[in-house]
Amino acid sequence: MKVLVIQPKIGMGDMIIYLPYIHAIAKKFNIKISILAKKNSRALELLAYDHHIEKVITLDRAKNKLGQHDGIKGFFKLAKEIRSEDFDKVFIFSSSIRYFLISKLAGIKSISQYPFLRKKDNIVISAKIFTEEHLNEIISTEPKIYWQENKKNHYFSNRYKHICLGLSASGATKRWDIKNYILLCEKINKITPCKFYLAGGKSDHYLIDKVLKSKIGNNCVSFENLKIKETIPIINNCNLYIGNDTGWLHISSALGLKCLALFMDSPAMAYGKYSKNISLIVPEGETEESTTHDTLGKDNISFKKVYEKTIELLS
């Protein structure tokens, strides 16, 4: 039997949140499965050493509608690509009729999918209910990333605490001010010597540069020029993640790190409650339930609470 999972969401965090259900499907059928996912999900790197995965097929759909799989031509092109793989079954983590019709056209006999045209959902709850119903078993929401240990993995001195600092985010409203992170690092370092690993990419250069030029800069290592799969062994050896709701949070959680996540303009209940590894801080005056899109609370995250929780988690 050949099984395909279609996961069309865009971010690293989404990809990681779906991992428990993807793994459960592979285990249920006792086979390696294929994934259809967008390039920006970083599935190729996140799943590079995952023994549950046979193949990652790149879904090329873009905001400007100019992706290879956009439009009518893209519809038929994707169907043809999937048909060539000769899949027997597909699980579609989406309510889009498009993926149902593509699967039909691709000749897949068994199609399991979310209810059509669902507008809003909690990503974790929807995926859990869907997969449990179709597999007839209870599934943990805790994700796991598999990675390859080798001699090139970084050696971490136990003279320091090692902290992955999630400076990046999908938008400015989801990003705590960089000055707060610099001050936080300075204060933590006075309590216990630390090394900080700046989790961000090339688009975060201006943030990373500010940290590297600060008083704490000599204690920092940047991820700016590293591939995602190169950062995984480093993150795995850290003691703690502190940062925004970003893909690095979810990578850290899936590697078993204690995580302190700052939610200020994204759904805390969906993206911060699925793992026992994640502790949340939300804006003053908000609750975990009320912190969601358009909360716009980045200026209301309590520095005192972040600092005190960090010291608690490091102890």
Image (spheres, rainbow, N blue to C red):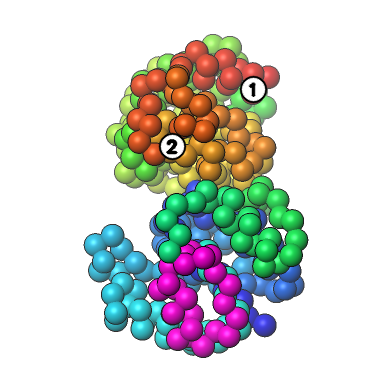
The quarter of the picture where residue 27 lies is bottom right
Q: Which residues are magenta?
A: 94-116
Please tell me whether residue 81 is drawn above or below residue 225 in the rendered image.
Answer: below
At 42% across and 16% down in the image, what residue appears? 183
The answer to whether any part of residue 133 appears in the image is yes
Please tell me whether residue 84 is drawn above or below residue 174 in the rendered image.
Answer: below
Q: Residues within 10 Å of mark 2 (few under 14, many from 20)?
A: many
Amino acid type, callout 2: Thr
Q: Earlier in the sequence, mark 2 or mark 1?
A: 2
Answer whether labels 2 and 1 touch (C-beta < 8 Å): no
At 62% across and 72% down in the image, what residue appears? 33
Question: Residue 292 has which mark?
Answer: 2
At 55% across and 29% down in the image, what residue appears? 280
At 52% across and 16% down in the image, what residue appears? 305
Left or right: 153 in relation to 72: right
Whether residue 238 is in magenta: the answer is no
Amino acid type, callout 1: Leu
Q: Position of residue 15 (x, y in %)?
A: 52, 55
